[in-house]
Amino acid sequence: MTWDQTQAVTVQPSADEEDVDTVVEGWSRLFAYQVVAIVAVFTVLLPFAGLVLALVGASYLRAGDVHVRRHRGGLLRVLAGPLTAPLDLVRGSAGTLVTVPYAAVPAVAVPLAAMAAVAADVQVTPLGGAAWGAGAAAYVLLAAPGVRAPRRHLVRVFAAFASGPRRIAAVGVLLCALTLASAVGAIMLQPRFSPMYELKNSIAQELSRFQHSIQQRVS
C-alpha cells in the first residue's frame, strides 16, 4: 500500500461519524422548518411585526449564507459573520427584495380565496383572511419553493449548534413548545394589525366588498 493510499484511508470518515452527521443534519432541517413555521404563525397574530421580522430575518440569513460560502468557521462565524461584512448584508437585503413580489402573490391570493369560501357557506372574517395572507407571505420570504438561501443557512446554524444529543434535545423541546404555543395563539387569538390601523380598515373594507359580491352571486 502506498503512502497516498494510507493517507486516504486515515482521513476517510468512519461510518459512525457519517451516521452522526446525517442525524444532526436531519434534526437541523426539522428545526429550520419549525422556525419558519413559528415566524409564519407569529405573522398571522401580528402581521406588521411578523412581516418585518420575516424581511429582516430572511435578509440576515441570506447574508450569512453568502458570508459562510467565502469564510469557513465555527458557530460564531455562522451566526455573526455577516456583521463583519457590510457588503454581505447588502447582498442579503437585495436578495430578499427580489422575493418580495413572490411573497406578494399569496399575500393577496390567500385572503381572496378565504373570502371566496363564502360560496361554500364558510365564513371567514376579512381581517382573519388578511392575517393568514401575511403569514403565507412570511413563509414565502423564508422557505417557499425556489427560496433556498434563508432555510439553508438556518440548517447550517442548527448543525453548528446542535451537534450533540443533549443540545438536539434541548433545542427540540424549546422549538416544539414555541410551535405549539404559536399554533394555539393563532387559533384562539384575534390578529392585531397595529400600528397599521388605516391600512387595516382599508383592507377590511375591500375584502368585505369582495366577500359580499361573492355571496350575492351564489345566492
Image (tube, rainbow, N blue to C red):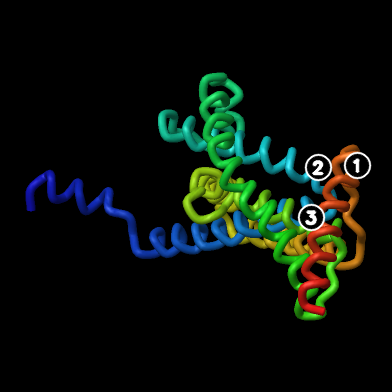
Q: Residue at x 86, y 45 (%)?
A: 202
Q: Residue at x 34, y 60 (%)?
A: 14
Q: Is residue 2 left or right of residue 84?
A: left
The residue sitting at the left extreme is 2
Q: Report the front residue among 22 and 184.
A: 184
In 3D space, how far apart are the residues under numbered discs 3 and 1 (Cα atoms)?
A: 13 Å
Say above or below: 1 vs 113: above
**Percent position (x, y) of residue 32?**
60, 54
Q: Which mark is residue 89?
A: none
Q: Are marks 1 and 2 in contact (CB under 8 Å)?
A: yes
Q: Secondary structure at mark 3?
A: helix
Count neighbours of disc 3 (C-alpha within 10 A) and say few if under 14, some if 14 to 19, many if 20 or more: many
Q: Secondary structure at mark 2?
A: helix
Q: Quadrant of residue 215?
A: bottom right
Which residue is identified by label 3?
130
Q: Is residue 103 left or right of residue 193?
A: left
Q: Quadrant of residue 169?
A: bottom right
Amino acid carrying mark 3 in the image: Ala
* N-terminal-most mark, 1 or 2: 2
Q: Is residue 35 visible?
A: no
Q: Report the front residue among 48 and 122.
A: 122
Q: Residue at x 72, y 55 (%)?
A: 133
Amino acid carrying mark 1 in the image: Ser
Which residue is identified by label 2?
48
Say above or below: 154 vs 181: above
Q: Is residue 59 left or right of residue 1?
A: right
Which residue is identified by label 1?
194
* N-terminal-most mark, 3 or 1: 3
Say above or below: 217 vs 139: below
Say above or below: 198 vs 203: above
**Percent position (x, y) of residue 13?**
32, 55
